[in-house]
Image (cartoon, helix red, strand yellow):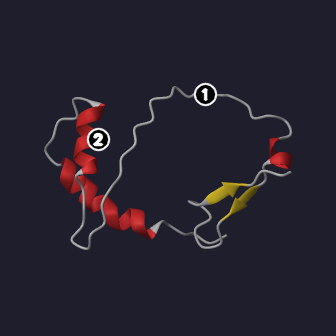
């Protein structure tokens, strides 16, 4: 596996940073609004989803998970993109 980074993410970060400059993050809604207004001159825009689910830490996966849902890593960006493929 090579040392790949996500090229879209890295090009978009400065725009998100600029949209948030000088603003006090007083709520999740404020951050969501700022990030959702982010765009580039080439037309790239954002869609923001806030996950409000509480995730349990230290939770173990099912013993047979790897057999019934093998993980397939992307060939170009394996560090960022992968899929769990359900087996029949």
Residue situated in front as seen by the camera: 33 or 63: 33
Q: Residue furthest left?
A: 22
Disc nearer the start of the sequence (1/2): 2
**Quadrant of the image containing the N terminus:** bottom right
Q: Is residue 47 left or right of residue 36?
A: right
Q: Is residue 56 above or below residue 76?
A: above
Provide the residue designation for mark 2. Answer: 32
Residue 63 lies, in percent from the top left, at: 85, 36
Residue 21 lies, in percent from the top left, at: 17, 49
Crowding around mark 1 (Cα neighbors within 10 Å: few <14, some 14 to 19, many 20+) is: few
Q: Is residue 19 left or right of residue 53?
A: left
Q: Is residue 70 above or below residue 8?
A: above
The residue lying at 62 percent from left, 64 percent from top is 78
Mark number, residue 57: 1
Residue 17 lies, in percent from the top left, at: 25, 54
Q: Is residue 73 left or right of residue 25?
A: right
The residue lying at 27 percent from left, 49 percent from top is 36
Dividing the picture into quarters, in which one does residue 22 lie?
top left
Residue 77 lies, in percent from the top left, at: 58, 68
The residue lying at 21 percent from left, 71 percent from top is 41
Residue situated in front as seen by the camera: 6 or 34: 34
Q: Residue furthest front?
A: 88
The residue lying at 26 percent from left, 74 percent from top is 42
Crowding around mark 2 (Cα neighbors within 10 Å: few <14, some 14 to 19, many 20+) is: some
Dividing the picture into quarters, in which one does residue 27 lie?
top left
Q: Is residue 78 left or right of residue 47?
A: right
Local SS, label 1: loop
């Amino acid at each position: 596996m090579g040392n790949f980074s996500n090229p879209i993410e890295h090009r978009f970060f400065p725009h998100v940073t600029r949209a948030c400059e000088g603003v006090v993050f007083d709520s999740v809604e404020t951050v969501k609004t700022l990030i959702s207004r982010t765009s580039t001159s080439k037309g790239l825009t954002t869609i923001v989803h806030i996950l409000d689910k509480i995730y349990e830490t230290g939770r173990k996966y099912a013993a047979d998970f790897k057999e019934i849902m093998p993980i397939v890593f992307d060939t170009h960006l394996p560090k960022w993109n992968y899929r769990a493929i359900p087996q029949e």
